[in-house]
Amino acid sequence: MKIMVQKFGGTSVASKERRQMVVEKIANAKREGYQVVVVVSAMGRKGDPYATDTLKELALDNTFDCSLRHLDLLMACGEIISSAVLASSLEADGYRVEALTGFQAGILTDDTFGNADILSVGTNKIFSHLEEDKIVIVAGFQGSTQDGEITTLGRGGSDTTAAALGVALNADCVEIYTDVDGIMTADPNIVPKAQIINEINYDEVFQMAEKGAKVIHPRAVEIAHYGNIPLKIKNTMSSHPGTCICNCRKNGTTPYSSKCSTQLLTAITHKDDITQVSLSMKEPLQKDSLILSDLAEANISIDIINFFVDKKIFTILTPQRSALEKILQNHKVEYSILDRCSKVTIVGSRITGIPGVMATVVYALAKENIQILQTSDSHATISCLVKEEDAKKAVNLLHEAFHLGRQ
Amino acid sequence: MKIMVQKFGGTSVASKERRQMVVEKIANAKREGYQVVVVVSAMGRKGDPYATDTLKELALDNTFDCSLRHLDLLMACGEIISSAVLASSLEADGYRVEALTGFQAGILTDDTFGNADILSVGTNKIFSHLEEDKIVIVAGFQGSTQDGEITTLGRGGSDTTAAALGVALNADCVEIYTDVDGIMTADPNIVPKAQIINEINYDEVFQMAEKGAKVIHPRAVEIAHYGNIPLKIKNTMSSHPGTCICNCRKNGTTPYSSKCSTQLLTAITHKDDITQVSLSMKEPLQKDSLILSDLAEANISIDIINFFVDKKIFTILTPQRSALEKILQNHKVEYSILDRCSKVTIVGSRITGIPGVMATVVYALAKENIQILQTSDSHATISCLVKEEDAKKAVNLLHEAFHLGRQ
């Protein structure tokens, strides 16, 4: 059985016109011979995990002291409403449909209400509906505990539901519908020449998300990667083929060969609002670990960590600056702070061991006098900390230097 | 059809006693219902890509000016001899066997003689033999070009052949037989409490290999990862279950959840013979990129790169020191050098975003007064540069601090 999982955001089901577009996407998949499982988000929950939630506001505005357990019961309704609405649209068009809650769909979670993790996905019910040639709609962002209590998922929301269903059903593909044509080589608001990426591998997307690009929640990518299920980012409003996240190889390469790559890099990301912190300490190292423990305890995550014998340099997110300073002052260490920095990162899983990549980065920035405040690199990324005012230019220069404008 | 690919090193077929052990491993797989494809290395080529090669010495000792093309033709014989020898052992035990050269097995490569990359693997011939219940033996480390010229593979040698066959045949498992029971949490010569790792994911092995552990060639891991084929490292001389490299999850976790991990880290690696280089330059940044280009051109790979406005710190492999100094002196930059350093790396794909990991590393080393000369981190690793004399102690302290001794 060829199976496709399609995930649509809440906005896609919020009006009749948009629902018709969703119906069209589902109809296309059916025409191509797929059995289709659709995952939907709540209408108020635009883009799932990042935005405000109408139902939540409803509960909290009433200042009624809602337990997490009951809040989850309430929150789960958003997706169930979307499911029912979409189901009726499809039925009106003559399709046979089965709409399921997360619980009904067999999505078992732990009992961390409000932030549950999926433990397993039972597939019997879904398979039996698919075998009857029905379209199955599953309410995203939710599941239930072993005891049958309704939970909502934390990280990744409905994207995670779609990826987990894709893996459990061993789907041929999971399509995540958004309002953009796909993942881009850079933020198009900053780089006018940014292009849609045709294919990208799981690790690269993971790195992009971690390094500041708002693409798809890394948790959903991680799950799809685990099951080796291709994840496609597509646009509800267009017929663009979108971006395929998979164990892909770029043009001209084969799975067995890493030569003949036409393009070294996949994308450039950037993240603003970063503060660089330098500690000059000649004291015993043990003090460092005490400071680090205090930072960890205060949930201040540190990044671009470069420790040397007499100097420790790292970055934090600017909003955490005052919490950081309190800790440093407690420990009576000398420190200096540089606000308004941006981290610009090049992402490409094939830069490992390729000589001259760092030289290209430094040259591109240096010839326009952009100061590199700090660097870090991993097997698939090189990050440069620059002044926030230089970030836009830096992203464009690197986009140009690595020829990302011509895909 | 359940298919298993088993790869044996040249030493395993070099004596009758050892060949009997290989036959036993193959017989076990047949008993478990697998159709078996065996890949063998040349007898002289102990551990494939790292060691000297008897046939090569033969050619070069004669100081006859051997073209790469002819050298490959010669070199390929080593594996063909092993294949024929093993085939006759199996036949003597009553098995039906088909021994194939890389060319016969359908392994098509590019024409980079001596360092060819596999382009594709034709599987028709192998499948037809397997369907007749025959054991297929394939000579590792070789293939042929489109024009039918014999090539030998570069990176990864016979391990790469085995992984590529595993992917092409969509095997259930690829077993790589070695002289150790599996991949260990640290070098057992250094850490007496080092344990065999039961399961490890592709990314972690890749990181381990890159960070100094001689486990399996990263190229083979990359190919297996591409096809999502489990790769097992096992011992020819024992019946230990070995280490499984796969998209695994540790005890107590599910594919969908990342909570409840019992162990944060997977392994600790270290790499000696590293030189730390510090450049103090206040000159325009563009000079940096010129130096970097020169280093790239001279094939000096730089690592743990930390660039700041007025200071650039990085490491090189000590043997490349004199080449480096020549370049730095050409550019008339001030520099200082610290030899006899070691890079100690903790590897664990689940350390991303876990607060306090860095604090644990620093604390473990600081409390025994081990100086951290430099650090770098990625989503799955933290590396500390220490003095070579401290390396052994540092690896043990970190092994202890992250409880790797009790698996």
Image: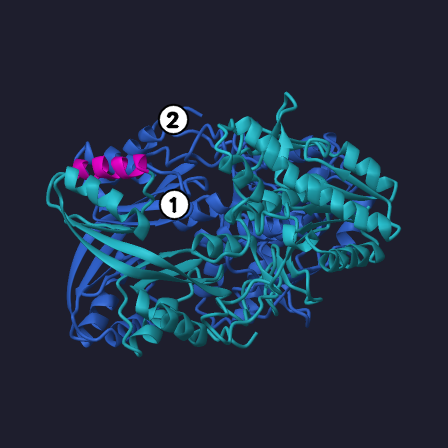
Chain colours: A blue, B cyan
From the viewer's perspective, is A94 left or right of A107? right
User: Is residue A348 inside the magenta stretch?
Assistant: no
Q: What residue did someone put label 2 on?
A: A405
Percent coordinates x, y for residue B261 in the rendering: 54, 69
State which chain disc 1 sits on. A
Asked whether the viewer can see residue A315, the reply is yes
Q: Residues within 10 Å of mark 2 (few under 14, many from 20)?
A: some
| Residue at 41% across, 35% down | A265
Q: Which mark is residue A381?
A: 1
The magenta span reads: B285-298
Mark in front: 2 vs 1:
1
Give the residue type that dot 1 points to.
Answer: Thr
A52 vs B132, nearest the viewer? B132
From the viewer's perspective, is B222 left or right of A284? right
Secondary structure character of the magenta stretch overall: helix
| Residue at 13% across, 38% down | B284
Q: Please identify the quadrant where the C terminus of chain A is shown.
A: top left
Q: Residues within 10 Å of mark 1 (few under 14, many from 20)?
A: many
The quadrant where residue A172 appears: top right
The quadrant where residue A9 appears: top right
